[in-house]
């Protein structure tokens, strides 16, 4: 097992539909260092795991949707 845990970035993103989520998904999937991510439409939470900086993830997602870091 891998004892190293990848950093986790959690953001609140202004997503209202599958279309919005799709745009965010496209941006995150193009980012280097992302190992996995999840988008929760109901809570408007986007969780990104991998070797990424919170600022970098926020900047990328902010290009398509209004976003703010939660942790």
Image (cartoon, grey):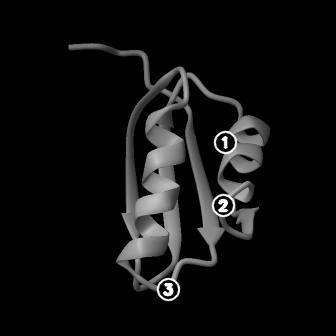
Which of the two residues, 64 or 49, is positioned nearer the viewer here? 64
**Residue placed at 54% from the left, 45% from the top?**
27
**Residue placed at 55% from the left, 30% from the top?**
31
- Label 1: state its secondary structure: helix
Instruction: Residue 4: give its label.
Output: none
- Do residues under tags 1 and 3 come within 8 Å of each other at their CB atoms? no
Q: Is residue 19 left or right of residue 2?
A: right
Image coords of residue 51 (percent x, y) = 56, 22
Image coords of residue 56 (percent x, y) = 74, 36
Mark 1–mark 3 Cα distance, whole angstroms, equals 19 Å
Residue 65 figure quarter: bottom right
Q: Is residue 69 left or right of residue 49?
A: right
Mark 3–mark 2 Cα distance, whole angstroms, equals 13 Å
Which of the two residues, 3 or 32, is positioned nearer the viewer here? 32
Residue under label 3, please give it: 16
Q: Is residue 29 left or right of residue 15?
A: left
User: Within 10 Å of the Cα at label 1, are there few (<14), some (14-19), or many (20+) other Cα atoms?
Assistant: many
**Residue placed at 51% from the left, 43% from the top?**
28
Residue under label 2, please give it: 64
Establish if 42 lies above or below 64: below
Establish if 63 lies above or below 57: below
């Amino acid at each position: 097992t891998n004892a190293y845990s990848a950093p986790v970035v959690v953001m609140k993103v202004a997503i209202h539909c599958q279309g919005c989520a799709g745009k965010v998904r496209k941006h995150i999937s193009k980012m280097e260092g992302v190992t996995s991510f999840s988008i929760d439409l109901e809570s408007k939470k986007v969780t990104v795991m991998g070797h990424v900086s919170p600022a970098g993830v926020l900047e990328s997602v902010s290009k398509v949707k209004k976003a703010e870091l939660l942790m």
